[in-house]
Amino acid sequence: MLRGAFRLQEVFSGPLRFVSDGVFDDAWSKRLTDTLAPRGYVKVSSIRMQGLLLLCFCQLKHLQFIRDIQTTYTRTGIYGYWGNKGGVSLRLAFYGHALCFLNCHLAAHLDRAAQRLGEFRHILDTQAFPGPAAPRILDHRLVFWFGDLNFRIQDHGMHFVRSCIDERTYDLLWSKDQLTMMRKEERALQEFEEGPLDFPPTYKFDLDSDTYDSRLHRTWFGFTGKKRKPAWTDRILWRLRSHGGGGGGPPEEEEEEDEEEYPLRIRQESYSSNMEYSISDHKPVNSVFTLELRKKGDAPLVRLQPGGDWSADTDAMVLYSPLQPFPSSVWDWIGLYRVGFSSVSDYITYAWVKDDEVSSSEEVVQVYVGKEEIPVRGGECVLCYYSNRLQCIVGVSDAFKVHESKLAGEEGLVSEQNRTSPREDDL
C-alpha cells in the first residue's frame, strides 16, 4: 500500500531554519522518515514551500511501480509573492494510475470564503506538470485535496456552536460550514467528495490544552477579548475522475476505454481528528482510504540480483536485466541499501551502470562493485536501480545477506562508506 501523504502547515521557517532546511531535512520530515523506515516504508518524494510541507511514503514492494514523480507549488500570500499561503502538490503514477496530492493553506478569517475559493481556482489553473498524460491537477485519475483550508462556520453564534460541540450534535453545524455550502454551488468543488464531519471542529485551541480559544488576542489597537469561533478548518477531500473527465490528456473515447479496462475505486475507511495533540492551536486530522485498482503493469523495468556471495573481503558483481524498454542514461546507477532504508538517498554505496559495467549480453549485464565499498559488518541488504531520466527507482532486488568481513574486528576497518549522492557529486 501507499502510506500516503503527510501534510503540515506553519512548519517553523525562520531565515536560519529555512536555509538549513534547504540543505538538510527539516525536523518533521526526519521524524516521520525515521519512524516509518523500520516499518518498511520508504519516502517517495517531498516538497516544501516555506512552512507548507508535503511528504509521500510507500511500502518497499511498491517502490519500483511508482513512476513519473513530479512536484510543484503555487504562492498566494502577499499577492503571490510570499509562500506562507498557497499550495504544494506531488503527482505520481501508481501501477500506471495517475494520482495527485494537493496540500493547501488558504486565506484565514470568517469573511474570506470567496478569497479562499479564488486561491483554490488559481492553484488549479497555474500548476502544471510536464508530459501529455496529466498536465493539470484535475487531469489525474485521483486527486487528494487537503490542508488548512480555513473555511469557517458562518451565521451560527459562538454559544450555539460550542453547545453543539459539547453535545456532539455536529450535524447541526454542517449546513453553515462554508466549504459544505460552496461545494453545492461552485463547479470547481462539486466533484470533490468528503466524509461526514463526525468529529469536533479542529480550530482554534489554546496551546497545550483541549480548550477552545479563551485568551486575549493582540490587535493593532491593543488587546481584544474576542474569541475565535470553532471551525473545521483542516480538511481532507478527494476527487475520482469520472469517464472522460479532465482535459488535456488523451481523447475522451480513449480515456473511457482505459478507465473501463483498468478500473480504480476508492473507499474512505475513517475520517477523524486527533484530540490528544496539543502543540498547535489546530488539532491534526487523518483519514484512511482503501484503493482497489487493476494494475496497468506488475513487472518492474529492471530485474536485479547480487552475483554470488557478498562481503568486504572480495570484489562483487551486480547482475541486472532490462525487462521492458525504458529511457536509460549514462547517469543511471545501482545502489546498495540496508533492509529498512528510508529514502533513495539512504544508500550504503552505489555503482554507475555504464562506467562500472564489466560485461553485457542480450539478457544480463554485470556491474562491478569494489570490496572497499561493501560494509565490513555485513547485514541484510537490497539492490535498487535508479533511472536518472525517470527520476525514480525502477527495479528492486530480493533481500540478500552481505557477510561480515574477516577484517571486521580489526581497528579502523569498521566504518562504512558515506558517499555523497551521485546526482550531487558527479553531475
Image (cartoon, helix red, strand yellow):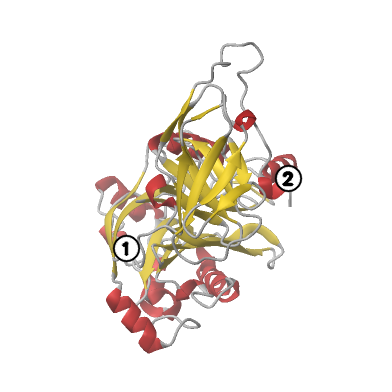
User: Measuring 56% from the left and 39% from the top, which residue is drawn there?
Assistant: 346
Give whichever of discs 2 and 1 has the lower sequence position. 1
Q: How many labels does the image show?
A: 2
Question: In this image, 228 relative to 332: left or right?
Answer: left
Tell me if I can see residue 25 in this picture: yes
Up/down of 198 relative to 378, above or below? below
Nearest the viewer among 309 and 338 is: 309
State the image quarter where residue 115 is shown.
bottom right
Q: Residue 425 carries which label?
A: 2
User: Measuring 60% from the left and 30% from the top, which residue is drawn there?
Assistant: 371
Q: Residue 131 carries which label?
A: none
Circle 2 SS class: helix
Q: Which mark is residue 174?
A: 1
**Residue 240 coordinates in the image, percent (x, y):** 35, 71
Nearest the viewer among 64 and 137 is: 64
For disc 1, the neighbor class at 10 Å (few under 14, some 14 to 19, many from 20) is: some
Circle 1 SS class: helix
Amino acid beneath label 1: Trp
Up/down of 236 relative to 205, above or below? below
User: Measuring 59% from the left and 72% from the top, which residue is drawn there?
Assistant: 130
**Residue 368 coordinates in the image, percent (x, y):** 60, 41
* Cβ atoms under marks 2 and 1 closer than 8 Å: no
Question: In this image, 367 relative to 154: left or right?
Answer: right
Amino acid beneath label 2: Asp
**Residue 332 coordinates in the image, percent (x, y):** 61, 54
Tell me if I can see residue 8 in this picture: no
State the image quarter where residue 315 is shown.
top right
